[in-house]
């Protein structure tokens, strides 16, 4: 595979704050697109299944209001969602509309395991077994090649997981790909490739994975999804001649896991230009087959020649991360297309492309039950403003509160950092007059240097003071650390379970520890 | 004097979180919210407040709205938008105040604004002494000199001009008598305090310094006075010297030692509730005083009671502090927030006030504090009074353990809190259907009774900023420890995999592996 540098959208580079990187890329980028066009953005909270408060959002241009949940907007009807959430109903809708789907049969709760197995034997292998309503690939078992494995799979899904409502389908050889469809058009297509590293002839697999994980942190939606050395990794390694110490040849690509999930370290790749007209047609018709579904992500299984495809699943809330930040290929501006669709009148509005808003404090306030509805401060006006960086050296301790007030009462945007009461760094957006006033005021406090500045800027005046971090800063920082700790605990528990499992198996085999 | 009785639905533990300039606004916001009104806090850039006069609002908490289905009222601290901009401007300008009062025949001190020092003698001749000199738009007792003789005027005038360059100075007759601050809402006086200048009372043993420390401790327990402690500065020492005392003098039992001449609460003065003792003519004067201004339905009135002239209005304050009447040093606390919310939302009088509930101000202001939000709405007030269970937990709880308790409580949809009670001692309260089960999930928790408690709209873990900072270090260590443990297991796992099937090697690492 040739690794080419991806082309990302310049207006989203460095614009995704840390708080959005944890499963909120779609929410953030759609909200950002609307907000940058001057739409009013409001977040509100609902209580999720885990009891925690979660974010919902709406955009409004004064007369039209649209509500969103992730990448799902309110033009998708509840009925459409119900159809997409139930794989057997999805298949029905596809068949009724003549959209190709894998052959198979649905079994309700009433069906016995024997009946399911009998059908499978009749149908012939390879097969796929999947529950009708589980999300995120839970309980989906693909490429089942014989009766014994199928029996095991049935017991696991229907008895252990308790998901009795299942589909048995023929397993179609080919590649999976996700196509984003909006209003009869294909916006983009992505494919997940299993986690891999490419050798340089010097570094070991272990070092290459480390390097790759560092690179992944540069990709917003992969920030929290490194290649983990988990069960899948060891299974793959074990089945090969490689170990962590193996040094692959320069240019040699080593697939380190068989599963392709992004969360397991898989790479999202933009494949929009690979789609044949026929495949595009299938995706568009799949969306049309469900009434009340103006946009969705269609999961396809395409044949090895990329000529044709069958529909595996239709998603009402597809993640946009892979379309926006693919590892190779080009980003596709899905948020822009969605906002054009929901707010056609805003299509030509000037966009504040170099500003972003801070999701972190909004989320923190909502999670702490301090706020149930938050209106985001509007994006700054686009005309007549400039951006500058200031450094001010001096004894700031006495003066900093007055400085804060002075700067906050001007209409400035950006970030101010006070370090050890001695140095103040500021990157500010404002009118030339305002920035001149800031320069004069800072000159009262110390020695000032001013330079031109570009790049992303916070759409509020955020004030950091390292001698006295605010309650909010401390609160958010701790919350991030706690999240990190939870992830780490989970990873540790997984590894420990696995070690225990192997020990038990060894004990059984050798009759001693 | 009697100890103070404060409104029981506003315990210090709840109110203490809103200190200083946030307190008055919080009391009103809380009152409205508890009645089921929608409460939103706003950023100073919010368009909603474009025509409301306000100041020092670059930090959030001072601007908020209360609304029901029919109307929205905007507040800046204690002032609702029923108070007109004209009234606010008049309140800030002492000459203008006097003009409005004069037009409405409300007694006010005679006097006039001085253009130059030369005016001083001319204007003084029109009044009978003694005199008062003050800067025209001062507040908090800033730039006021009272009880001056004709000979002192010139010297004090020059002093004021030096201290407050460029500010116009006002000459008034000095009126002798006790001074009161009243709060008027509509046709009624809702509260009244006399403000006594800072003082301590001797016990025959303690020094002045010790007595002040003792009094400041008492003030710390008062939500309003906690941020207005008595300072022993040069001014205090001068007053002491005037009484022939020093900081280490030991005043005799019952001796009242003055520490200030001004009565301002912010300078250590004591607010004392006097509403029930107030003569009717004074109340009527206060109500008439507000009516002298255009659209001024509620606000503070400073009145002096002179033997010769009866009640004389010194000042009106459209953005008055109400907290000193809710939490006086002595006497009964008056429910001014109730009176104000009743005035704006008369229908809401019928709603039961959810007195057991409150919202945590800092949590509600988070998104405004950074500037991310232009408006932030407080979650709906939990209306029913919760019967819940109290537990005591006696063990160290690190940040992660506290977070675990929080997650558990949120999953069970409980109201309540976890609060530190001394070292390694915690107080837990939870109300809701699954409170019992929650208690069972707290290892080592001892039940400490059942009953109601003050709650926020969710489960809250009490952290101070310092707690949070300490937690950061703690969690970082925890992450490091967990990561190290995981790496060790990974090593073992690696060994297990490479040695699986080689029984000879297995022994070797089963020693350290298990």
Image (tube, rainbow, N blue to C red):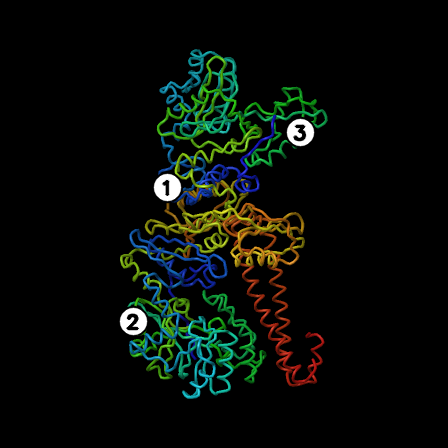
Query: Which is more toward the observer, B238 or A290?
Result: A290
Coordinates of residue B380 in the picture (x, y in percent) = 45, 48
Q: Are marks 1 and 2 on the same chain?
A: no
Q: Chain of mark 3?
A: B
What is the CA distance from the residue labelled 1 to the residue labelled 2?
A: 45 Å
Query: Which is more toward the observer, B493 or B353?
Result: B353
**Which is nearer the N-term, disc 3 or disc 1?**
1
- Mark 1–mark 2 contact, CB under 8 Å? no
Coordinates of residue B359 in the picture (x, y in percent) = 50, 46
Specify the quadrant of the image occupied by residue A332. Answer: bottom left
Answer few, some or many: residues within 10 Å of disc 1's Cα (few below 14, many 20 plus, some between 14 and 19). some
- Secondary element under disc 1, as helix, strand or loop, is strand
Q: Chain of mark 1?
A: B
Q: Which residue lies under the disc numbered 3?
A: B211
Q: Are marks 3 and 1 on the same chain?
A: yes
What is the CA distance from the residue labelled 2 to the residue labelled 3?
A: 83 Å
A331 above or below B123?
A: below
Residue B493 visible = yes
Q: Are marks 2 and 3 on the same chain?
A: no
Q: Which mark is residue A10?
A: none
Answer few, some or many: residues within 10 Å of disc 2's Cα (few below 14, many 20 plus, some between 14 and 19). many
Residue at x 56%, y 74% (from the top left corner): A229
Q: Which residue lies under the disc numbered 1?
A: B72
- Secondary element under disc 3, as helix, strand or loop, is helix
């Amino acid at each position: 595979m040739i690794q080419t540098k991806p082309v990302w959208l310049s207006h989203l580079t460095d614009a995704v704050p840390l708080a959005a990187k944890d499963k909120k890329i779609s929410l953030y980028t759609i909200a950002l697109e609307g907000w940058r066009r001057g739409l009013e953005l409001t977040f509100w909270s609902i209580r999720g299944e885990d009891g925690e408060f979660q974010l919902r959002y709406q955009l409004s241009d004064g007369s039209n209001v649209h509500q969103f949940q992730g990448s799902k907007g309110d033009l998708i009807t509840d009925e459409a969602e119900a159809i997409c959430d139930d794989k057997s109903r999805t298949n029905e809708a596809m068949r009724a509309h003549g959209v190709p789907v894998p052959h198979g049969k649905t079994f309700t709760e009433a069906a016995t395991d024997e009946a399911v197995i009998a059908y499978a034997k009749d149908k012939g292998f390879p097969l796929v077994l999947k529950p009708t309503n589980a999300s995120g690939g839970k309980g989906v078992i693909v490429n089942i090649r014989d009766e014994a494995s199928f029996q095991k799979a049935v017991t696991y899904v229907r008895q252990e997981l308790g998901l009795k409502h299942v589909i048995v389908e023929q397993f179609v050889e080919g590649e999976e790909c996700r196509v984003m469809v909006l209003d009869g058009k294909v916006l983009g297509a992505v494919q997940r490739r299993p986690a891999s590293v490419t050798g340089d002839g010097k570094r070991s697999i272990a070092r290459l994975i480390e390097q790759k994980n560092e690179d992944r942190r540069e990709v917003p939606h992969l920030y929290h999804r490194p290649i983990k050395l988990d069960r899948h990794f060891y299974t793959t390694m074990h089945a090969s001649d490689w170990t962590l110490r193996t040094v692959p040849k320069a240019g040699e690509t080593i697939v380190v896991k068989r599963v392709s999930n992004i969360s397991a370290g898989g790479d999202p790749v933009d494949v929009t230009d690979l789609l044949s007209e026929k495949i595009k047609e299938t995706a568009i018709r799949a969306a049309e087959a469900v009434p009340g579904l103006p946009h969705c992500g269609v999961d396809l299984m395409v044949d090895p020649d990329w000529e044709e495809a069958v529909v595996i699943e239709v998603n009402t809330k597809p993640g946009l991360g892979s379309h926006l930040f693919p590892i190779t290929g080009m980003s596709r501006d899905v948020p822009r297309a969605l906002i054009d669709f929901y707010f056609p009148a805003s299509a030509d509005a000037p966009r504040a492309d170099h500003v972003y808003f801070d999701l972190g404090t909004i989320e923190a306030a909502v999670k702490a039950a301090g706020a149930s509805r938050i209106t985001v401060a509007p994006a700054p006006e686009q005309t007549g403003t400039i951006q500058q960086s200031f450094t001010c050296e001096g004894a700031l301790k006495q003066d900093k509160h007055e400085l804060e007030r002075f700067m906050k009462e001007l209409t400035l945007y950006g970030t101010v950092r006070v370090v050890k009461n001695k140095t103040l760094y500021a990157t500010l957006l404002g009118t030339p007059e305002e920035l001149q006033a800031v320069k004069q005021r800072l000159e009262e406090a110390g020695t000032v240097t001013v330079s031109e500045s570009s790049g992303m800027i916070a759409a509020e005046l955020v004030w950091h003071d390292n001698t006295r971090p605010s309650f909010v800063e401390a609160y958010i920082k701790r919350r991030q650390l706690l999240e990190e700790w939870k992830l780490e605990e989970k990873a540790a528990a997984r590894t420990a379970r696995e070690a225990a499992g192997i020990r038990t198996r060894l004990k059984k085999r050798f009759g001693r520890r | 004097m009697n100890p103070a009785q404060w409104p029981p639905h506003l315990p210090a533990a709840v109110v203490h979180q809103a200190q200083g300039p946030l307190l008055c606004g919080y009391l009103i916001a809380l009152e409205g919210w508890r009645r089921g009104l929608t409460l939103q806090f706003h950023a100073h850039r919010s368009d909603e407040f474009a025509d409301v006069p306000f100041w020092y609002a670059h930090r959030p908490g001072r601007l908020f709205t209360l609304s029901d289905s029919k109307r929205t009222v905007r507040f800046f601290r204690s002032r609702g938008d029923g108070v007109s901009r004209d009234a606010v401007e008049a309140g800030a300008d002492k000459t203008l105040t006097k003009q409005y009062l004069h037009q409405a025949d409300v007694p006010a001190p005679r006097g006039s604004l001085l253009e130059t020092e030369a005016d001083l003698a001319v204007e003084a001749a029109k009044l009978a002494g003694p005199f008062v000199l003050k800067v025209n738009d001062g507040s908090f007792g800033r730039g006021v000199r009272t009880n001056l003789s004709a000979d002192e005027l010139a010297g004090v005038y020059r002093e004021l001009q030096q201290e407050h360059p460029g500010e116009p100075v006002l000459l008034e007759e000095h009126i002798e008598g006790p001074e009161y601050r009243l709060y008027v809402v509509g046709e009624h006086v809702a509260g009244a305090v006399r403000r006594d200048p800072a003082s301590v009372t001797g016990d025959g043993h303690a020094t002045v310094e010790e007595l002040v420390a003792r009094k400041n401790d008492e003030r710390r327990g008062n939500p309003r006075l906690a941020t207005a402690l008595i300072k022993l500065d040069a001014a205090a020492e001068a007053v002491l010297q005037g009484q022939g005392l020093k900081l280490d003098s030991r005043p005799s039992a019952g001796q009242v030692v003055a520490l200030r001449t001004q009565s301002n609460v912010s300078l250590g003065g004591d607010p004392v509730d006097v509403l029930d003792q107030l003569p009717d003519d004074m109340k009527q004067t206060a109500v008439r005083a507000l009516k002298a201004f255009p659209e001024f339905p509620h606000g503070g009135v400073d009145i002096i009671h002179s033997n010769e002239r009866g009640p004389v209005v010194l000042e009106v304050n459209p953005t008055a502090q109400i907290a000193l009447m809710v939490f006086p040093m002595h006497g009964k606390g008056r429910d001014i927030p109730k009176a104000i919310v009743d005035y704006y939302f008369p229908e809401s009088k019928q709603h039961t006030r959810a007195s057991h509930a409150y919202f945590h101000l800092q949590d509600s202001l988070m998104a405004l504090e950074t500037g991310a939000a232009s408006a932030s709405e407080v979650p709906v007030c939990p209306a029913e009074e919760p019967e819940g269970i109290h537990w005591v937990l006696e063990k160290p709880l690190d940040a992660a353990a506290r977070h675990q308790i929080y997650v558990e409580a949120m999953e069970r949809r409980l109201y309540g809190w976890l609060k530190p009670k001394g070292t390694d001692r915690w107080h837990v309260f939870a109300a809701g259907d699954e409170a019992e089960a929650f208690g069972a999930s707290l290892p080592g928790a001892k039940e400490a009774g059942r009953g109601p408690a003050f709650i926020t709209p969710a489960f809250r873990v009490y952290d101070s900023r310092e707690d949070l900072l300490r937690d950061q270090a703690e969690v970082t260590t925890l992450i490091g420890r967990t990561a190290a443990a995981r790496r060790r297991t990974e090593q073992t796992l690696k060994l297990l995999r490479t040695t699986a099937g080689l029984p000879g090697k297995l022994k070797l690492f089963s020693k350290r592996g298990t």
